[in-house]
Structures are given as C-alpha cells and as structure tokens.
Amino acid sequence: MLSVLLVGLVSCDEDFNKDVAPPQSNDPETVRDLNFQVALASDVTSPVNLQGLDPESTLEMITVTSGSSLEEGESLYYGLEIAKTESLENAIELPTTADDQSAVVTVADLDEAIKSLFGKAPNANQVYIRPYVYVQRGTSGVCLTANTVGPVTVTPSAPEIEEAYYIIGNMNDWSYDELIQFNHSGGDVYADPVFALTVEVPANCYFKIVPQSAKDLGADNFWDGKILGTAIDGDTSLSGELINENAQAIQIEEAGFVRITLNMEEYTYTIELMDVNPFLYVPGDYQGWDPATASQLYTTHMDLIYTGHLYLDGGYKLTTAPNWNDTDYGDGGDGKLDANGGNLEAAAGFYYMVVNLNTMTYSLTATTWGLIGDATTGGWDNSTPMTYHVADNTWRVTTDLAIGSFKFRANNSWDINVGGSASKLVVDGDNLPVTSAGNYTIVLKLTNDDSSSCTITKINTTD
C-alpha cells in the first residue's frame, strides 16, 4: 500500500515492487450467528438463605440453552458478574465452574460477594447477575455478553447480632428491673460485634445474657426470648461458646470485679477477673509527676468509667496506683489510651475529665464554674461566676444569696453540674438549700464524686 502511494506521489517509471512478493490474502471467513438463551437457574429463582449451608457446597446460578451448534474443537465457558443494581455499577466477578449448560458457584464465594456488596448483616439483599459466554477454539475465543438477569434475593451467612445485650444473675438478684447493659462502640454491630461489661459479682455467681429482643418482651415474658448461656449449667470456664437453645447459666467462682466480653459474630464469651482500683491518679507537669500527690479520678459504679475535676498544665499520664509500679496509661493515638503510651498534653486550665477504660478513651472539657439557682442573683437562668485559685485548687465567690436553693454548674450550661451536700458534691446531685438570706463566701473544692465539697460561710445578714 505504501509503495502504491509513493508511485502516486512521485512520477517515476521504476517498478519498486519487482522483487517483492505479492501480498498474501485469505478468503473471507463465513460469518456465524451464535445464539444462546440465558436464564436464572432453579437454585436461585427463590430467595436464597446462605445461613447454615455448607460453604463448600455449590449453587447453580444460570442455565444456558444453545440455539447454535458448536463446531468441532469449540467449547463453552461462562463467567458471572454480580452487583446491587441492574446497571451493574461496581460489579464483583464471581468465580464459577461450568459445563455446557450452566454456571455454578460455591456458597462461600457467593457469601463473600454479598458481604462485600452489602456488609455482614443477615439481611435479604437483591442482586443482579450478568453472565458472559465464552466460545473457545484452541487458544483463541470470543466473549459474548448476555443481558443482565435478576434480581436474585440472597441472605448472607452472618449470625444474628442484636443492637444490645444485658446481664442477669446473682449480681442483680435475677431481676428484670435491674438488668445491666453491656457496653458497645455504638457503630454497626456487624462491623464491631464485641460487647463488654465490667461488673462486681459475688462468689459463685451464676448469670445469663439477655438480648434486646428478649428484653423487649417485658418482665413477664422475657424468659421466652432467646436467652444466651452455655450448654452445661454452672460452667466455670473463663471462655467458651454461647448458645440460645436450652441455654444454661455460666458461673464465676470468685467474688470481685470481672470484665465479661461477648463476640457475637463468633458467639463466644470471655471472663477476665479484675482487681479494680476505684481511683485513677493523674500525675503530670502541673504537680511534679508524683502519683502519690496527684489529682484523682473516681469510678462511682466500679464500671471502669472514671471522672473528676482537676487543673492541668502541660504533660500528664494516668496511673492505676499512687506510684509508677503498676500500669500507667498514655497517648495511644487517635484519641485512645494505651498502656505505657506517651504523655498526654493539656493547655493550662481547669478541666472535667472522663476516662473509660472499657473502651480506652478519654475526654477533657475545659470548665469555669458558677452558682445557679433561685437563691442566686441570676436565678435559674444565668450562673453567678466564680474565680479559680490555683494555689489551693479552689473556686471562690462572695455574693448575696436569698432564701431558696442553688447548685454549681460549669460553663453557664447544664452539661456539667454538681450538687448534693456541702460535704459531698456529686455530678447531677441535689440542690443545696439556703435558709437565711445574706452575703456569703462560697469556696468550691472539686476533685471527684468521692471527695468534692464546698464551704458556705455567711458574712452578714440581709434579711
């Protein structure tokens, strides 16, 4: 072709092709029409529930009826794509085995594809399938794309995981009204199937697990729900499998605090015997890194959730004892705590701190404090501000009080407030009474719910 073109462009009499063989040519091949009819196989025309199926077993997904005859040496193969929508957006290819009439997948491969598309929850999901038909002859072949078929309804094999679980047993007198809820991250229970609880138990404590669906049946009927336990009554194993058919009670022999962890994807439990100290110590730059003289957080319910009020300025850590001999907690990254982690940091200020050792998380809220109540000049609408004294770690104010009541709150908001009695102030405690109007000096000493207090000193009478 190039030679012919050059002849056309250059007026020349020389035959440039005299020593070149003429180009090879083949007779055109006969065009073949290949006709295949693709349909859903009977295995998947009804809803498919993969729960309890053998992962190595197979399901026939499509059947193929050939309207054309294959020639000698030709064979058929099939491929499958599966997706959420008929448009096949973000489709996943399914491994298949096939004969001349059908495409087959394993339960395990289909299960994995459904979970990749929809997550692990055992919901009935609708999917669409696009088959491919490959006609192969020797080392060459052609791929024919069939129309999308479906929808097919498939439920993956994940176990049922409920939104919440509760403990019932000797620790709460087997009382429905005293059920104790397991802690959870609050996310998707199929992405995070772990529930945990720290609780104090008596010696030889028996218990079972109440799922949310059973609790919802009410006090008279909750035992009819799917209560979880073990196969053997009084099983003292510190780990094992949970069942919900004829479930028996688990037993903890030693009295004290224990941490019970449930993995509801695996339906297993573990029990950790704990030596819980009601205090966490917060040594740091603000006081010379001495745990023995550090501010303390307190766990009111012995549930490993510690709270307290303290002044910080620079680096600090948390210790489980008033020394450095036991575990200390520091910065684990991403707002998490880690045993023997790096120093935590805080700008100079007074804070309300919450530490949850169940989830290894903590929070700091900078606070300024004031009085609120009908005994104060601001009533129940506006706090009367107090002044912080670093030297003795107190908040102070001198103000007029009328007959009535008041309490203390942070940041002119009700998010953090304390009340109760002057000798013991606790978060969300009762109002403190004022029985005689006058001018008062009030000194607030905030530490934690075990030892916070205040003094209310009348300077002169105004009534």
Image (tube, rainbow, N blue to C red):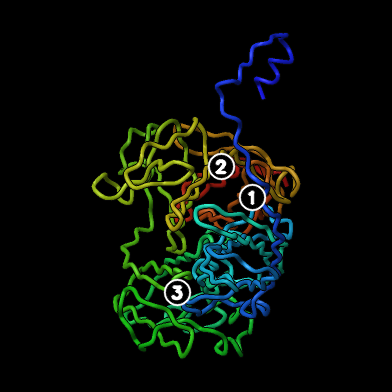
Report how far apart the C-alphas of labels 1 and 3 lie in the structure. 55 Å
- Horizontal placement of 415 versus 328: left or right? right
Looking at the image, which residue is at 47% across and 81% down?
A: 228
CB-based contact (under 8 Å), mark 2 and mark 1? yes
Secondary element at tag 1 = loop
Q: Which of the two marks, 1 or 3, is nearer to us in this view? A: 3
Looking at the image, which residue is at 59% across and 60% down?
A: 135
Three-letter code for the amino acid on which mark 2 is drawn: Thr
Looking at the image, which residue is at 57% across and 90% down?
A: 224
Q: First in sequence: mark 2 or mark 1?
A: 2
Secondary element at tag 2 = strand
Three-letter code for the amino acid on which mark 1 is drawn: Asp
Residue lying at the far top in this picture: please name it.
11
- Horizontal placement of 462 versus 223: left or right? right
Is any atom of residue 43 visible in this view?
yes
Q: Can you identify the residue that label 3 sits on?
A: 56
Report how far apart the C-alphas of labels 2 and 3 lie in the structure. 54 Å
Q: Can you identify the residue that label 1 sits on?
A: 415
Q: Residues within 10 Å of mark 2 (few under 14, many from 20)?
A: some
Three-letter code for the amino acid on which mark 3 is drawn: Glu
Report how far apart the C-alphas of labels 2 and 1 lie in the structure. 10 Å
Q: Position of residue 156 (x, y in %)?
A: 57, 71
Q: Position of residue 280 (x, y in %)?
A: 38, 50
The quarter of the displayed image where residue 289 is located: top left
Q: Can you identify the residue that label 2 sits on?
A: 365
Secondary element at tag 3 = loop
Between 165 and 322, the one nearer to me in the picture: 165
The quarter of the displayed image where residue 88 is located: bottom right
Image quadrant occupied by the N terminus: top right
